[in-house]
Image (spheres, rainbow, N blue to C red):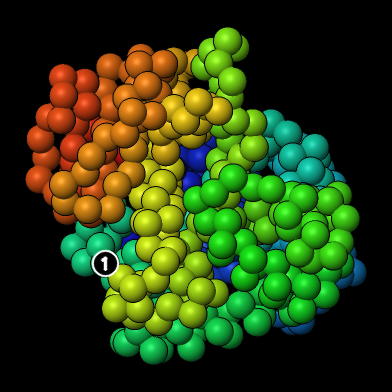
Amino acid sequence: MITRSIENEVLEGLAYLPAVAILGPRQVGKTTLVNTIKTRLEKPSVYLDLEYFADRDKLLIAPDLYFQEHENETVILDEIQRMPELFPLLRSMIDRNRQPGRFILLGSASPDLLRQSSETLAGRILYLELQPIHYREVANHPYQQHWLRGGFPNALLAPTDKAASLWFRGFVQTYIERDLPALGLTASPDTMRNMLRMLTNVQGGLLNYTDLSDSLNVSQPTVKTYINFLESAFLIRRLQPYFANVSKRLIKAPKLFFRDTGLLHHLMGIQDLEGLQGNIGLVNSWEGYVIQQIIANLRSDVDPYFYRTKDKAELDLVLVQNTKVKLTVEIKYGSTPTVSRGNTSAIDDLGAALNLIVTPQADDYWYRSNLRVCNIGTVWQYLNNEGLLAEN
């Protein structure tokens, strides 16, 4: 059993608020997490899987009576996106008997779900995202295997790389053919398969809607709708540019990353470390891996960006807290990294007290007075020293 880092945060939310929502992609471990949390709750709980007909039936005729019957228990509603019509009733139930820890909602988010629930349950609910298993949760695991297979539990813990690849095949098919349409996406499965494969070529690059529109033969607004859905379903991330100086000619397009490198590698046809090492997408995959691990471990008041100007000044990750650039990160694949003129210019532009170069396994040393080389295993101490790291 892998202890998930948000476990204590969920319990703290339940001790104060009537409802906590745990959102994340399918198969990321939400149900396993809540089964662990149930043993630590201060009162009994009842669990309903809204994809299971017998559980759905309990809420079809008189859901208000069901919730009243269990008002002294924590009611866990899994796959809440299957019954969004419950949100107004949940608000009513909470307002009639406002006590901490009444509901735990588990779901794969969609734009409509987030909008409906946030409008209906404002002030009554805490939203938490369960990320794929991240580096600090499996620090005793070889980072190479974590990077290759990603953080979906069934892939990461599979007995072989082949077994992990077979699991991803079924996962992608189910997500494309069933889950995304259930969230409201109208694109055909073939269109989404083509789009996901195209996006593997955008990993770590600037997102160009025109290129995707032309390649898919659909309109730009349609492409943006598809991208919004994939982001809402926690499959991809659009990292926004940081605007530090209005006098600079800045890049305005976001960069795109797959949140889980295991999914990325599956879509690229990579099944083992040897295949990864020989792939042209190696460096961009490593950049995305490091960015995901860092973002998954940031405090909630830290905002991540990248920085790039049209004069080639650039840094891969800029961490901002209270409107101040606290730390920057440049990600390199190699044990003897070099710093480009563009990196130096960006460091001067942003003025952070500490700047890091993160490598797979180089020793830690000062490259210059405000620039330190570290590796994926030691970067956490610098984030923690700057007050950017969430509790684990």
- Horizontal relation, residue 263 to residue 177: left or right: left
Residue 253 drawn at (x, y percent)? 64, 37
Give the residue displayed 21% in from the left and 21% down from the top.
Answer: 370
Q: Residue furthest top?
A: 247
Residue 120 drawn at (x, y percent)? 80, 40
For the N terminus, the quadrant is bottom left
Q: Is residue 191 above or below residue 327?
A: below
Residue 286 drawn at (x, y percent)? 36, 56
- Marker count (numbered): 1
Observer-nearest of 121 and 155: 155
Give the residue displayed 49% in from the left and 84% down from the top.
Answer: 167
Observer-nearest of 291 and 310: 310
For the C terminus, the quadrant is top left
Q: Specify whether residue 12 is in view.
A: yes
- Quarter occupied by residue 141: bottom left
| Residue denoted by label 1 | 144
- Quarter occupied by residue 319: top left
Where disc 1 sits, the SS reads helix
Q: What's the amino acid at mark 1?
A: Gln
Give the residue displayed 73% in from the left and 58% down from the top.
Answer: 212
Q: Is residue 152 above or below residue 6?
A: below
Give the residue displayed 77% in from the left and 50% down from the top.
Answer: 210
- Horizontal relation, residue 338 to residue 97: left or right: left
Observer-nearest of 348 and 155: 348
